Amino acid sequence: MLQIEIRDKACRGCRFCVDTCPTDVLVFDDATQKALVKEVDDCIGCLSCGFICPSGAITHSGHHVVKNFYRNIYFSRRMEKFL
Ligand code: SF4
Ligand code: SF4
């Protein structure tokens, strides 16, 4: 099962991850000025958020790492709602 962890102490509130996510998995919490995971089930495992985060605050586990993830039936089901 895919999981996303955002380390609170490392997050500097730049919002890059929120703006980058193609499927709106992440949201910005104005109260804490930190990014939060809202809909982990919508994550397609592109890893863009982790790549762009200047603090290295985001880590993923349990994700599917091959490029052609759309051939995987589990990920295909996830993608359907965005097509
Ligand atoms: S990109 Fe990193 S530092 Fe910026 S809001 Fe997201 S988790 Fe925080
Ligand atoms: S890995 Fe991709 S789809 Fe998943 S939360 Fe990060 S940017 Fe969004």
Image (tube, grey):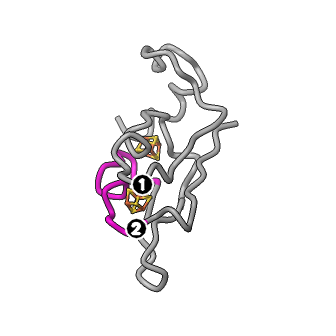
Q: Amino acid at mark 2?
A: Arg
Q: Residue at x 46, y 49 (%)?
A: 56
Q: Is 1 left or right of 16, judged from the image as shown?
A: right
| Residue 55 lies in the magenta stretch | no
Query: For residue 55, which numbered disc appears in the image?
Result: 1
Q: Amino acid at mark 1?
A: Ser
Q: Is 27 left or right of 59, judged from the image as shown?
A: left
Q: In the rendered view, tell whether residue 55 sits above or below residue 68.
A: below
Q: How many marks?
A: 2
Furthest residue in direction right, as rendered: 1
Q: Which residue is mark 2?
A: 12
Furthest residue in direction bottom, as rendered: 31
| Residue 11 coordinates in the image, percent (x, y) | 46, 64
Tell me the SS state at disc 2: loop
Span highlighted in magenta in the image: 12-25
Q: Nearer the viewer, residue 67 or 61?
A: 61
How much space separates mark 1 and mark 2, taking CA atoms? 7 Å
| Residue 21 coordinates in the image, percent (x, y) | 36, 48
Q: Is mark 2 within 8 Å of ligand 1?
A: yes
- Quarter of the image with the C terminus is top left
Tell me which image quadrant ligand 1 sits in.
bottom left
| Residue 22 lies in the magenta stretch | yes
Q: Is mark 1 within 8 Å of ligand 1?
A: yes
Magenta segment, prevailing SS (helix, strand or loop)? loop
Q: Residue at x 55, y 57 (%)?
A: 6
| Residue 33 coordinates in the image, percent (x, y) | 42, 77
| Residue 55 coordinates in the image, percent (x, y) | 42, 54
